[in-house]
Amino acid sequence: MKDKYIFELEMKVRDYECDLQGIVNNANYQHYIEHTRHEWLSSVGLSFAKLHDEGVDPVVARLSLAFKTPLRSGDEFMSKLYVKKEGIKYVFYQDIFRKSDNKVVIKATVEAVCVINGRLGESDLFDRTFKPYLCE
């Protein structure tokens, strides 16, 4: 079976991302997955900042995170994603794996919508650009 992931990004936990328990603070996982989405956009030729300047803003409408295994300072990890389109939404399925043992760290689902010049709408640019990458 073909790997469902269409993009992956390697990262490393920095000391300041950890809490007093010595594990990554839960809020930082949102940063990791957001950075992964932005890097994927860049890899397909879209600049998040340029889109905004043109009045096109992909925004998170709903986010779900399931925490499985904690990361600690210095851990290297892979952040992976695949995407589906459901109606007006793009749904990003994002998983993080610890590199040392390939354990699942988090499983996330991010529903994003497009706001064009302040109004919720469909983006022909996204539809065209994302089409080759959409999972069934």
Image: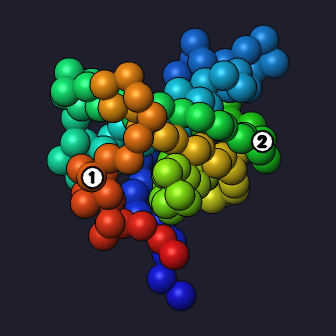
Closer mark to the observer between disc 1 and disc 2:
1
Q: Nearer the viewer, residue 39 or 72?
A: 39
Q: Is residue 15 above or below residue 38?
A: above
Rendered view: 38 above or below 126: above
Residue in the foreground of this view, choosing between 130 and 93: 130
- Assess disc 1: are there few (<14), some (14-19) or many (≥20) residues with their C-alpha within 10 Å of its C-alpha: few
Asked whether residue 62 is in view, the answer is yes
User: Which quadrant of the structure image shows residue 115?
Assistant: top left
Q: CA distance from mark 1 to mark 2?
A: 34 Å
What colour-coding does the image apply? rainbow
For label 1, the SS is helix
Q: Amino acid at mark 1?
A: Asp
- The correct choice, above or below, for 42 with respect to 13 in the image is below
Q: Position of residue 109 (x, y in %)?
A: 64, 48
- Left or right: where 131 falls relative to 3: left
Q: Which mark is residue 33?
A: none
For the residue labelled by badge 2, is the local secondary structure a helix, a strand or a loop?
Answer: strand
Which one is earlier in the sequence, the residue at label 1 or at label 2? 2
**Can you identify the residue that label 1 sits on?**
124
Query: Seen in the image, is 17 located left or right of residue 131?
Result: right
* Residue at horizontal 32 percent and vertical 47 percent from the top: 123
Q: Give the camera-side residue of 85 and 82.
A: 85
Expressed as whole percent of the image width and height from the top left, the position of residue 12 reads 49, 34
Q: Residue at x 42, y 54 (%)?
A: 8
Picture coordinates of residue 89 (x, y %)? 52, 50
Left or right? Give the position of 55 relative to 136.
left
Q: Give amino acid for label 2.
A: Phe
| Residue 77, percent from left and from top | 54, 45
Labels 1 and 2 touching (C-beta < 8 A): no
Q: Residue at x 31, y 25 (%)?
A: 117
Q: Which mark is residue 67?
A: 2
| Label 2 crowd bin: few (<14), some (14–19), many (20+), radius 10 Å | some
